[in-house]
Amino acid sequence: QVQLVESGGGLVQSGGSLRLSCAASGSITRLSAMGWYRQAPGKERELVALITTSRINYADSVKGRYTISSDNAKNTVYLQMNSLNPEDTAVYYCNIRGWLAGSSKYLEVWGQGTLVTVSS
């Protein structure tokens, strides 16, 4: 079984920064992609940032403000969020894709979500 544990959300004032972390535990290996999504009240979940073995993608709304990084040895992905504004308020979910160790089964696992609230 694979689980993701997120941390780092909270309340911050506009212009502030937060760093989210997401650590995968269990039998997942050869990670192909690690990403962050968010869902604001009344809106659909959207991709915020994605890191794969060959590229990094950001949503236009966060380019220049957010930075995604990973520590593959620890199966951990991070999201550094700077210059936050109230429109960034959402539940942030991490998503990790890879293979179940010792098998050919491809997994996609979601974190439980962490709330980020930006006050004006």
Image (cartoon, rainbow, N blue to C red):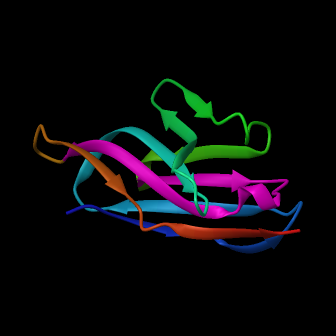
In the displayed orientation, state which residue is furthest to the left: 103
Give x and y (percent) for residue 18: 73, 64
- Say which quadrant the C terminus sits in: bottom right
Determine if the magenta segment contains residue 119: no
| 70 versus 4 height, above or below | above
Observer able to see residue 64 = yes
User: From which residue to which does the magenta span run?
Assistant: 75-100
| 9 versus 36 height, above or below | below
Q: Residue at x 70, y 63 (%)?
A: 89
In the displayed orientation, state which residue is furthest to the top: 54
Give x and y (percent) for residue 80: 69, 53
Please count the marks in the image.
0
In the displayed orientation, state which residue is furthest to the bottom: 11
46 sits to left or right of 3: right
Q: Residue at x 51, y 50 (%)?
A: 45
Give x and y (percent) for residue 87: 76, 56
Give x and y (percent) for residue 93: 49, 58
61 sits to left or right of 51: right
The one of 33 and 118 positioned closer to us in this rendering: 118
Q: Residue at x 32, y 54 (%)?
A: 109
The one of 33 and 87 positioned closer to us in this rendering: 87
Determine if the magenta segment contains residue 78: yes
59 sits to left or right of 63: left
111 sits to left or right of 87: left
Q: Residue at x 29, y 42 (%)?
A: 98
